[in-house]
Amino acid sequence: MFKLTPRRALVVYINGNRVIKTLRRYGIVRYVSRRMHYVILYVDQDQVAPVKEKIQKLRAVRSVEESYRPDLDPTLTDLEMTGLYKLHDEDDKK
């Protein structure tokens, strides 16, 4: 049966566009912003740490950040109770 592999997105900030071809070896390149100089790269969850170290050693890479999306709680319904959002005077509370 088909089994999903958990993945994590890495945001790779680059100096030049030549390194994009090299990044394809490490994972799936999902998005490339040539003007803002970053790449969204998907990597298997168990390979995040070693791949992140290898990518940071590349010459044209400025920095690498992990996506926080898998760590967020998808069941947050009331942001006011958690303290993440505070009501202001212009907000309508019904």
Image (cartoon, rainbow, N blue to C red):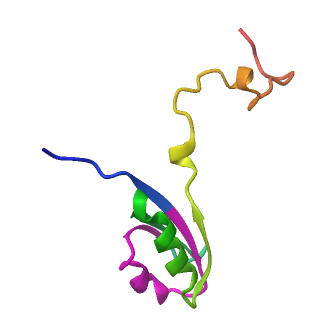
Task: Work out which quarter of the rendered image holds the N terminus and state it.
Answer: top left
- Front-most of residues 80 and 53: 53
Query: Residue 8 location in percent, x, y?
Result: 45, 56
Where, by quadrant of the figure, is residue 92 drawn? top right
Horizontal arrangement in the rendering, residue 44 relative to residue 14 (left or right): left
Horizontal arrangement in the rendering, residue 83 relative to residue 44 (left or right): right
Q: Relative to 85, does residue 5 appear above or below in the rendering?
A: below
Q: Image point 57% across, 91% down: which residue?
A: 59
Q: Relative to 1, does residue 5 appear above or below in the rendering?
A: below
Magenta span includes 84: no
Horizontal arrangement in the rendering, residue 83 relative to residue 45 (left or right): right
Task: Work out which quarter of the rendered image holds the C terminus and state it.
Answer: top right
Q: Could you tell me if residue 46 is visible in this image?
A: yes
Where, by quadrant of the figure, is residue 86 drawn? top right
Where, by quadrant of the figure, is residue 7 drawn? bottom left
Q: Which residues are magenta?
A: 10-32
Q: What residue occupies the far left of the structure in this picture?
A: 1
Query: Residue 55 location in percent, x, y?
Result: 51, 79
Query: Residue 64 location in percent, x, y?
Result: 59, 71
Query: Residue 84 location in percent, x, y?
Result: 74, 32
Magenta span includes 14: yes
